[in-house]
Image: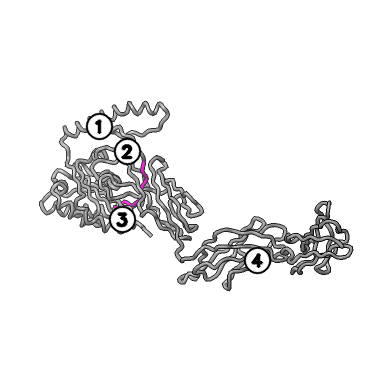
Amino acid sequence: MYRFFKNTAVCIFVVISLALLGNSRVFAEGDLNDKMQNINMSGMEAGINIGEALNAGQEVHVSQYGSEYTDIWLEGTYLYEEAWKILELVNKERAKIGVPEVTMDKDLLYAAMTRAIETQIDFSHTRPNGESCFSISSKVFGENIAAGNSTAEGTMRQWMNSPGHKANILDKDFSIMGVGCFTQGGIRYWVQLFGNSEAVPTDERQNIDTQEAVQVITDNIQCQMNVGDPYRLARGEKENYDGKFVLLNNGWNIAVTWILPSTIEWSSSNTKIFQVDTLGHLTGIKVGSGTLSAKLKARPEIQGTLGINVYDPYGLENVKNLKAAASGKNKVFLSWQTAGNAEGYLIYAQKNGKYGYVGMTTKGITFTDTKALDTDYNYYWVFPYVTDQNTGKIIPGPCEKYVYAKGIIPSVQNLKASSVKGGVKLTWTEQKDAEGYLVYGQRAGGKYGYVGMTTKGTTFTDTKASKTAYNYYWAFPYHKDNQGNMIVGGTPKYTYGRAL
């Protein structure tokens, strides 16, 4: 089965993480003001157009730059423990050149954590909603970002080996900082934010699991299925892998973000083959193929599909040529073709609307249900099975179709008519469980109807049979139920004869 394991991703991306460093130096005061002015003007101009859309009844979000955005929900962990390790390493480097220490600032710490989750979506100094990284807090005058390294020490080596990042870390004008580290269990995204205002004390050191939304420019959203197509799923398996529909990182196109599964609408093209729940967990039902569809609930036009192949992990074949036949009072006889690799067979039935276990066999390809209904049809399924060698559990295989029959006496065999003086004599083979036989017929020129009955053998003579034309006959076995009601058996082939 193809799977995208989170811990595997770490190993892959650490190798190339050196190329994924970004730094942004403090703007001069005039430059920063000009930039903010441009942002505001752009937002106002675009806001006019969007306002027209709102008047038309369309709900549209607008970023500061005037772009439409969508909330993308993520699940992951803020690693506050790693943030303090980075702070310690930064101050060690600053001490080497006699630069005063920086202090962890509460506002910048939270802002850096936010930027870390944002770089999970867009690894750049531009925020996913199109704004500058400096918009995260008025205290920010410098930012370093990194991704892929799993330790604080490794990440610091990355930054210190890059002149731009190193300059931010050692800048004597910076007195406060915040550090962010976010992960979804694989790649870690790291952020340093620097400032020069008075520090707001904080001692937040405990890692926090989170589910939260990040605003992303809608046009920048690129989603795809993140597993091999077709995806192989074992029949009977209930797998908990939900990272199938992912968001591509705009700043690092080989990295992906696991979208919170509950914000995705999942569907199966054929629920008889496989099923999918609201969190994207698949269950293989029957050997076959289908298509998994996923779409963002907030933006249904953003969607993806994935072929699903359900296979039998034990190599069990379908039960084929399943047949059911009436076999006597409250009896139905089942037969089928041998299924490959089966150790035995489980028989299930639906009677009076209730489905349940009937029996099993390990000694052949037949089974007789001795508790079958005689007044209504019984519906049967036969499943091959094997025993799991590790757990000892019985693992059922597939059944191609169901069959049905009533628990009545089969039709009489060898029904014959012979001409005798004064009538037509009927004979047949005795049927097990029969308490008697009903004879119906159609005499020459007459209508089909009751002729007679017998409880003392397998013969009957029709003394009113026509001598000049053929008379047609049917003989039905019967038994009585617990209430004394007569239950008529199967319909035989007719026979015919004339009286002498």
419 left or right of 44?
Answer: right
Question: Distance from label 4 to label 1 (Cα)?
Answer: 81 Å
The magenta stretch is 71-79
Instruction: Find residue 123 and report its horizontal and vertical position in percent.
Output: 25, 46
Tell me which residue sits at (29%, 41%) in the image: 128
Q: In the picture, which quadrant includes the N terminus? A: bottom left
Residue under pointer 2 = 219
**Which corner quadrant holds the C terminus?**
bottom right
Residue receiving disc 1: 39
Q: Amino acid at mark 4?
A: Phe
Measure how far apart labels 3 and 4 are at the Cα level.
57 Å
**Lower sequence index among marks 3 and 2:** 3
Residue at the disc numbered 4: 333
> Residue 258: x percent and y percent?
35, 50
Q: Amino acid at mark 1?
A: Ile
- Determine the secondary structure under disc 4: strand
Question: Which tag is nearer the camera, tag 4 or tag 1?
Answer: 4
Q: CA distance from mark 3 to mark 2?
A: 26 Å
In the current view of this chain or complex, which residue is farthest to the left? 97
Label whose residue precedes the other's in the sequence (3 or 4): 3
* Label whose residue precedes the other's in the sequence (3 or 1): 1
Closer to the chain start, of discs 4 and 2, is: 2
Distance Cα–Cα, label 4 vs label 2: 64 Å
Instruction: Decide whether the magenta segment is chiefly helix, strand or loop.
Output: strand
Q: How would you rate the neighbour count of disc 4 (Cα within 10 Å): few for under 14, some for 14-19, many for 20 or more?
A: some
Q: Residue at x 22, y 56 (%)?
A: 15
Q: Amino acid at mark 2?
A: Asp
Q: Nearer the viewer, mark 4 or mark 2?
A: 4
Q: Earlier in the sequence, mark 4 or mark 1?
A: 1
